[in-house]
Image: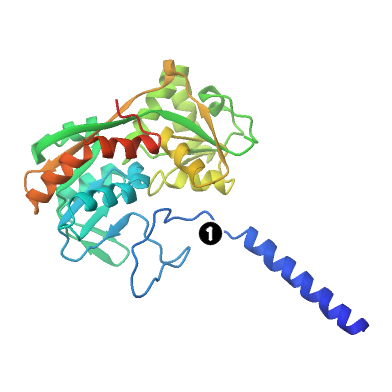
Amino acid sequence: MMRIVKIFGLAVAGMTVFSNANAQDPHRFDPPWNTPPQSAVMFTVPGINNVPDLYGDIVDPQLTVFFAGNQFMCVDDLLAGFRKKHPQIERIFVETLPPGILARQIEGGSLTLGNLRITHTPDVYTAGKTRIASMQRYFSRTEVYAYNKLSLMVPKGNPAGVRGLEDLAGGTVRISMPNPAWEGIGRQIEIAYEKRGGAQLRQAVMEAKVKDGSTYLTRIHHRESPLRILHLQSDVAPVWTSEVVYQKLIGHPVEEIKIPEAYNIRSTYIAGQLKNAPHPEAAKLFMDYIVSDEAKGIYAKYGFEVE
């Protein structure tokens, strides 16, 4: 009897260890946060084979869209709504990489990710107003469709006690910052720093703290910032307001610190139809859809402004 009790006790202990291990799964917050398309073989492996910014049908697409990456949360709903209106367009390929990376891909004609080389020309490219203006020669048509503002994302409970932008200069505050080299939001955040604390605040965050390692510049995508907050690797992350709205919608433990209007910015999102779009008719239909009330409702759902 004692032996049975002992075995049972060991089994319970083992179950507890297993449960705790699951609770501390290092990949529990990992993307893809969208719904992957169904296939005969589903081979996403957390931490190894996981490509969250390429979507859909890469072989012979009937429509290709390059979205500035911070719109990834809208893609499922947008494509579902578009397909419902235009069921003849079945194969759609989408990228949601940083807008600067997508721009270089358009200009150079290709991108390699791991061992995969992509040579698709997009039918539609979406980005911020400044980026679109600098690439105007590529487009036959452009349309404004949404807006966004900045917020600070912190872990639930805000353990570092961050109250506003001014606190980011503190030596012990760890920041996750979009890299201005390829993320349009990076420069927008720098403008917000200058509005709140002048060149001194910007230099503290973007120079001194980058050097000492307490400001982390994203290496791939500002999708890294929510992950760093969720894994408690950073104390605060300046992000688009839509990023906080989305993380809270999917139940992740984050909170928002609002940035006052006086120090905030408003970003304008513009879609451009490529002059050399491989599928001009599908491109036109998507351009019409992205400015529709239905599409604007999708953007509003995820925290974007549409008026």
Residue 307: quadrant of the picture: top left
Q: Is residue 94 left or right of residue 201?
A: left
Q: Is residue 44 left or right of residue 152?
A: left
Q: Quick check: 92 above or below 150?
A: below
Q: Mark 1 falls on what kind of element?
A: loop
Residue that carries the numbered disc 1 in the rendered image = 27
Q: Is residue 161 left or right of residue 4?
A: left
Task: Give residue 65's position: percent from left, percent from top.
Answer: 21, 49
Near mark 1 (Cα within 10 A), the count class, few <14, some 14-19 or many ≥20, is few
Residue at 53% of width from left, 22% of height from top? Answer: 166
Task: Give residue 194's position: percent from left, percent from top.
Answer: 41, 20
Residue 111: quadrant of the picture: bottom left
Q: Quick check: 77 above or below 54?
A: above
Residue 97 at least partly seen: no
Residue at 15% of width from left, 58% of height from top? Answer: 88
Q: Quick check: 23 above or below 228?
A: below
Q: Quick check: 148 above or below 19?
A: above
Residue at 55% of width from left, 46% of height from top? Answer: 230
